[in-house]
Amino acid sequence: MTMKEKYKILTQYIKDISSETSNVETYLFVKDNISKYHLSIDITSKPLKNRLIEINTTLKFEDKEGNEKKSYFEIIYATIINVNNELKEKNDLQKIILCDVQVLIYPKIEKALLDLIHNSGFPEVRFEKKIDFEKLYNEKFN
C-alpha cells in the first residue's frame, strides 16, 4: 500500500485568520521592523469519528523581540483526512499528519497568510525560506 492510499484529504479550510495592528504609530513602527519578524508553525491533530482526523496547522508571523508596538498575523488551517482501515502504525500516522499532508496543503496556507499580511498594509513581506517538512519530520523522529 502506497502512502497516497493510506489517507485521503476530504476537505480543507481556513478555520481562523487574524491580523492585528492596533494604531497608525504601531503600523509605521512595524513597517520599519517587519523584516525582523519570524514565521512559526504548529501542527496539532485530533481523531474524529470513523477514522477521520482533523489536522490544525497554525502559522504565525510575529515579532519575537518583545517590542511594545507590534503587529500579529495568524492563520489556523484545518484539514480533515480519512485514514485507511489497514493503517495501524503510529509512525505512519505521524508522518502523514506532520509531513505528507503538510507538503500538500502548505502552499495554500502560506499564500493565504501572505495575502493577509499584504492586505494588512505590508506588501513587501516575502517568506524566503521554505519549510522542509520531510527534513523536520526526520530530525524529530529519526
Image (tube, grey):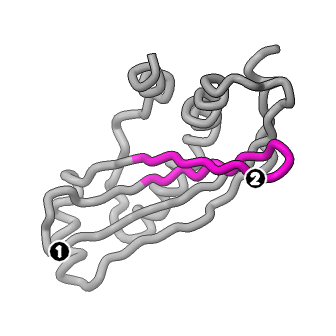
Q: Residues within 10 Å of mark 2 (few under 14, many from 20)?
A: few
Question: CA gap, disc 2 to disc 1?
Answer: 40 Å
Q: In which quadrant is the N terminus drawn?
A: top right
Residue 103 percent location from the top left of the image = 58, 32
Q: Is residue 139 above or below residue 21?
A: above
Residue 17 percent location from the top left of the image = 52, 67
- Residue furthest bottom in the image: 23
Q: Quadrant of residue 85?
A: top right
Dot label at residue 69: 1
Mark nearer the N terminus (2 vs 1): 2
Q: Amino acid at mark 1?
A: Lys
Label 1 SS: loop
Depth-wise, is mark 2 or mark 1 nearer the camera? 2
Q: Which residues are magenta?
A: 41-59
Q: Quadrant of residue 73?
A: bottom left
Q: Is residue 100 above or below residue 53?
A: above
Residue 119 percent location from the top left of the image = 45, 68
Q: Which residue is drawn at the image coordinates 31% and 77% (left, top)?
A: 21
Q: Amino acid at mark 2?
A: Leu
**How many dots with numbers?**
2
Label 2 SS: loop
Magenta segment, prevailing SS (helix, strand or loop): strand
Dot label at residue 22: none
Q: Residues within 10 Å of mark 1 (few under 14, many from 20)?
A: some
Q: Which residue is drawn at the image coordinates 29% and 83% (left, top)?
A: 22
Task: Identify residue for label 2.
Answer: 48
Residue 112 percent location from the top left of the image = 54, 56
Q: Which residue is drawn at the image coordinates 41% and 26% (left, top)?
A: 140
Does the magenta portion include 48?
A: yes
- Looking at the image, residue 59 sits to the left or right of residue 84; the answer is left
